[in-house]
Amino acid sequence: MRTREKKPICPIRHTVVIVSAAVILLHRALRGSHALMSRLSQTFVRPLLRRLGERCAACSFSVAELLMAAAVTLAVVYILFCLEHRSRRGGFLSRLYRFVLSFVSFALAVYAGFCVLWGTCYYGDDFITRSGLEQRAISAEELQTVTAYFAALANTYAAQVPRDTEGVCATDRQEVLARSDGVFFNLEREYPCLEGAALRAKPVRLSRLLSYLDFTGFFFPFTGEANVNTDFPPSLFASTVAHELAHQRGVAKEQEANFVAVLACLSYGDPNYVYSAALMAYIHLNNALASVNPPAAAAIRAELDEAVERDLEANKSYWARFETPVQTASNSFYEGFLQSYDQTLGLKSYGACVDLLVNYYYEDVSAFYGGTA
């Protein structure tokens, strides 16, 4: 009698695990080589992301959201299938092994792809290096001056954006998205390193879910799309769009993406974008000023227009509804993610754009304010 030859268990899954693990380990081993990461990000990753973004731009919907929804759906179907066949006799350990290996291989493959398509950008030349901007330590007085400037700018443009019957910013998000393909048109002339395809940001249909996770948007490297939450108050929507589009143009670090978003919105000139950027910059700057000079921060806050105050309160009230254990867990996970890519400030790195803003704007505004606010 011929003995039946035993087939290997899950050869494809094992191959995926091995290859993915090798890519991840190689990335971790080589990411300390700044020259190599810069070369890869500029000659391979950014051109690839651009092509992906251009291909997906043909779809009005977020391909990223579709892929994630499909992945979740398939995972649920697979789990239900496995549960349906759990009562079959024999081979329990083998079925359990296949089940676990399926999810492990998928997770590793996704993470390996992320390491190549986006993780590389964290270790190459950042925007500060590529742009040639100088960084220096800032003083409390300089911070105060620039904070006052953006507060005044927010006051000026608060009257130029649509408002509802309660006086809260009612900017049309769809109009902002429709014009988002031109937000970097002027800035990329000043900084050619930001040159990229004129693509629009994509709205996320399940935006309320993003709010529960405390996300206003995300860049999806597998499709090259900038995706934005369309549920939170619109006063900060345009600057969020510019932030995600900055990622699309290769600005990986969060603090730099915020800074670039402000520059892009102000250079664009559209009142909705300018107001949103001024408000975002003011929030970061005044929070930093409050930690070193509370009276000065309070004095500048007292000068805000009532319309600006209403928008700040609308944002505060909206996000207060999502302060749940889910949001806490999401923040902890994302902070760990940022730190794993040597963003040692974690979520606080979003506020590190303060130094960049002060360095960039202080010289131009100090004469108007006489050096202090």
Image (spheres, helix red, strand yellow):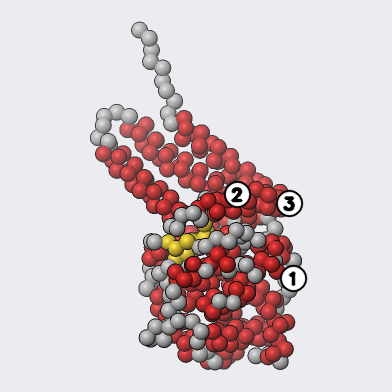
Q: Is any part of residue 324 visible from this angle? A: yes
Which residue is located at x 59 percent, y 77 percent?
269
Counting residues from the start of the chain, the first of labels 3 and 2 encountered is: 3
User: What amino acid type should be assigned to the residue bearing mark 1?
Assistant: Glu
Q: Which residue is mark 1?
A: 134
Q: Is residue 188 above or below residue 275?
A: above
Counting residues from the start of the chain, the first of labels 1 and 2 encountered is: 2
At label 2, counting other C-alpha atoms closer than 10 Å, the crowd grade (few under 14, some 14-19, many 20 or more) is some
Helix, strand or loop under label 2:
helix
CB under 8 Å between discs 1 and 2: no
> In screen coordinates, is 23 left or right of 370?
left
Q: Which residue is mark 2?
A: 48
User: What amino acid type should be assigned to the residue bearing mark 3?
Assistant: Ala
Q: Is any part of residue 290 visible from this angle? A: no
| CA distance separating discs 1 and 2 | 29 Å
Counting residues from the start of the chain, the first of labels 3 and 1 encountered is: 3
Rendered location of residue 318, percent (x, y): 40, 75
* Front disc: 1 or 2: 2
Q: Which residue is mark 3?
A: 35
| CA distance separating discs 3 and 2 | 19 Å
Which residue is located at x 68 percent, y 49 percent?
43
Q: Is residue 38 above or below residue 83?
A: below
**In which quadrant of the rendered view does residue 75 lie?**
top left
Check the picture and name the quadrant holding the N terminus.
top left
CB under 8 Å between discs 3 and 2: no
